[in-house]
Amino acid sequence: MIPVQDAWTRAYAKGEAQTPRVRVTFTDPATGATTDAVPTEGTLTRDNTQWPRVTAEIVTQGAITPELTAPPVSAYGGTVTIQQGITTSDGVTVWMQTAFLLVTGVAIDRPSGRITVSCASHEAAVNEDRYDGKTATAAGTGAAIITTALQRTLGASWPIAGAFTADRAFAAGAWQYDGDPWPVIEQISAAVGGEVYFDAGGAAVLRDRPVKVGSPAVSVIVGPNGQLTGYSSNRRWAYNRVALVYDDGTSRVTGVWQQTDAASPVRVAGPYGRHTYREVVSVPAGQLPTAGNANAAAKAKALTLTNGFRSVELRAVPAPWIEPGDTIEVGMFGLTERHMVNVVTLPLSGLDVMTVTTADDTYTGGIS
């Protein structure tokens, strides 16, 4: 959850009238000069099911004549800061920074003068800095190995915060980069039950992957003063069993997790049957994990997969402080539930609702 001022959350909770505000600041990579703009259209999306985790498309309006319609920022090193705010019914204006992103593309359309700026969080830069050949990791904890990989691209001074509760040491060569680095970073974080993402200020955050609902970052309800404008609920097949096969070219170790809760309708021994996710992980010779560590990695992987049994898409008045992993309380027609947030898409025009995709394991049982 991004820190937010009380004036905003109070107005939101009461369903008070509010005037939305959005502004973006583009920064030139060569001079450091900044240019402010108010988007006419666009979206900001935070999605923990993909990387880059945060993406944005910002649409601004250029001039009526071609010579005055120029790119507001360079796609070759430019950055953008997004701020969102409201003016409350009593005239108080509050702001919060919701993203600091890399500019990945700038498109100008004539004769409309429409300028579209595409942006992404810093996973994009880390992955673009691909390894030319196979490179083994040094010995160290998961956090240390990931920090080294991030600083290789972003620099030693780049802010990196947080920690993994179940972090552990890996031998030299336990992981190997060969081209794209970000999938390996995700494998390392998953092996210790964690995740890596970039926050609204651009800092890298290492943390345990949220798997249980907690205190809600916001409540959205149906009603005269409510914020919920619509929703759809979907229950479907998902994986109730995970097999991670570690292969060093000669031998294999397989880590397994499966849903065995007798009370769960998706238990492997029940009428739902076995639905297995299988992945082969190549490791250097002699670097196979222990059976215990392989099983722990399978369980960590399951945490990223099993929330697919039920998802709910909400449409509501924007609450820009919500992030993936947050808990949201939903007051639907005659039903109040707490869900885990997976995806948030916010309008940058200030004239539309947000959409939030959540996961809920109330009816299928969690992972233990």
Image: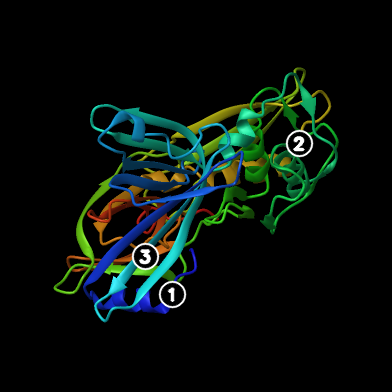
Q: What element carries label 1?
A: loop
Q: Residue at x 69, y 54 (%)?
A: 159
Q: How crowded is mark 3: few (under 14 residues within 10 Å), some or many (20 or more)?
A: many
Q: How crowded is mark 2: few (under 14 residues within 10 Å), some or many (20 or more)?
A: many
From the top left corner, tell me how far across and down residue 3 is, in percent.
49, 68
Q: Is mark 3 on a helix, strand or loop?
A: strand
Q: Residue at x 37, y 69 (%)?
A: 218
Q: Is mark 2 on a helix, strand or loop?
A: loop
- Of badges 2 and 3, nearer the viewer stands 3
The amino acid sitting under disc 1 is: Gln
- Of badges 1 and 2, nearer the viewer stands 1
Residue topped by disc 1: 5
100 sits left or right of 133 in the view: left
- State the CA–CA distance, disc 1 to disc 2: 46 Å
- State the CA–CA distance, disc 1 to disc 3: 10 Å
The amino acid sitting under disc 2 is: Pro
From the top left corner, tell me how far across and down residue 54 is, in percent.
47, 45
